[in-house]
Image (cartoon, helix red, strand yellow):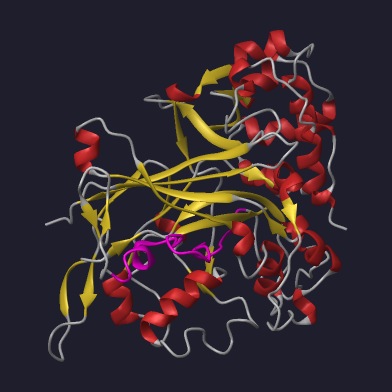
Amino acid sequence: MSTTAILDATHDPALRSWVAAANQTACDFPIQNLPLGRFRHAGSDEPWRIGIAIGDQVLDLLLARSQCPWGADIDRLLAPLAAGDMNRFMVLGPAARHALRAAMSNALREGSDQAPFLELCLVPQASVEMTLPCTIGDYTDFYTGIHHATTVGKLFRPDAPLLPNYKWVPIGYHGRASSIGVSGQSFPRPFGQTKGEGEAPVFGPSRRLDFELELGALIGTGNAPGTPIDMTRAEDALFGVVLLNDWSARDVQAWEYQPLGPFLSKNFATTISPWVVTMDALAPYRAAFERAAGDPQPLPYLDSETNRRAGSIDITLETWLQTAQMRAKGESAVRLMQSNFRDAYWTLAQLVAHHTVNGCNLQSGDLLGTGTQSGPEEGQGGSLLELSKAGKEPLRLPNGETRTFLADGDTLILRAFCEREGLVRIGFGECAGTVLPARA
């Protein structure tokens, strides 16, 4: 059994923090969460350091290491985090992650002897700027959302929306790590070739710009070339999860994706949320992984008792939109849809096992996108391509505006949370990005 599935005192729903905001109902960052991110004071040129989100505050681990007494073992774990090097901590593996989580949970709970020291190490989240949580050396995007794959497939192949391999192999392609940005990212509308009226394509800004609601899994410990990570070890290779928006130029994609898949339609921008929710924090929300009756069972290298029992994760996913007009009038974003990661056709462990089965080596900080997470019901599409029926049925917003695809000035926000009866709700924060006009 994977060590990441073990529940311990850090998940106790009765735990409360001396940071008052962490105890508020519907707070994304209660003491049961403790996600990690890389930050500095907004507007400063100080070095980046790693912090822990707690309530509406950030626990600065650079200050916490120097201001608060810790044992030698915990001080050793804090060293790379204080230096802003998440990768050097991630590669230490699950045992190190468990130990740090336990120490931080003890230090941040009500009645902690360390509270007087750590009170001086808190920074309001409103006064910091965030960057990518770690160095992302490589990025692979999968296609685990069967409802998205089916809906999109019907647009092109009404009688056979899923290709014959879909239910047997986790489909993926290699994305572009260099254009991954953190929440708050803005980017100009991309240019590209699109299908013209005649034989020749036309070149210009994309007119069918879209979002894709995804999760991103960060690798903690990788593998040597030629040495696959099997299903019994795949969970322990995972460090944590972020929200991921795989922005897509649908018109460019339609022209270029045959025969080798997406290229310019996907590589201009990808946005992730800044706080990494660790696999430890997600442990209470694990769920059985079950295939629908009549679907093929995974091949042996993609199967394990642990994966069948608890391979899925119960994460509610949402997308929200704030248009430029709404922003100018001080109007809040509106929710476009909601789905759940339990509907994914493949688990995170299966993505790791499949990615490495041919000997491919993963490294600490590598990012695995899940693909668009749509739900089975009408209105649960994880992209505008689905929600607007490929642009044929515009969405009407509460202020009277309509959208088929994204307009200049639109801000798209991803949100997610886990909640179960008897447990404290935990959240992921926001993953927001804004579309700017195309450059002249």
User: Quarter of the image containing the C terminus?
Assistant: bottom left
Find residue 29 and report its horizontal and vertical position in percent. Answer: 60, 31
Q: Where is residue 99, by image quadrant?
A: top right
| Main SS class of the magenta portion in the image | loop
Above or below, 268 relative to 303: above
Was residue 384 drawn as part of the magenta stretch in this picture? yes
- Of 305 and 37, which appears nearest the observer? 305
> Which residue is depicted at the point 65% across and 29% down?
30
Q: Image height check: is 75 above or below 406?
A: above
Tell which of 378 and 80 is nearer to you.
Answer: 378
Q: Is residue 28 visible?
A: yes
Give the residue displayed 46% in from the left and 67% down from the top: 175
Q: Is residue 290 above or below residue 366?
A: below
The N terminus appears in which quarter of the rendering? bottom right
Give, as a single range, the part of the protein colored magenta: 365-390
Q: Is residue 114 above or below residue 160?
A: above
Q: Viewed as shown, does residue 389 lie left or right of 143?
A: left
Q: Residue at x 57, y 69 (%)?
A: 144
Count up the numbered dots: 0
Q: Which quadrant would residue 349 be assigned to in this image?
A: bottom right
Residue 37 horizontal/vertical position (percent) = 56, 37
Q: Is residue 330 left or right of residue 302?
A: left
- Residue 413 magenta-highlighted: no
Q: Position of residue 303 (x, y in %)?
A: 79, 74
**Of residues 70 and 104, the one drawn nearer to the viewer in this rendering:** 104
Residue located at (57% from left, 29% from top) = 27
7 displayed left or right of 405: right
**Residue 329 is drawn in which quadrant?**
top left
Q: Is residue 47 visible?
A: no
Image spot of residue 404 (x, y percent)? 26, 62
As drawn, the residue found furthest toward the top would be 116
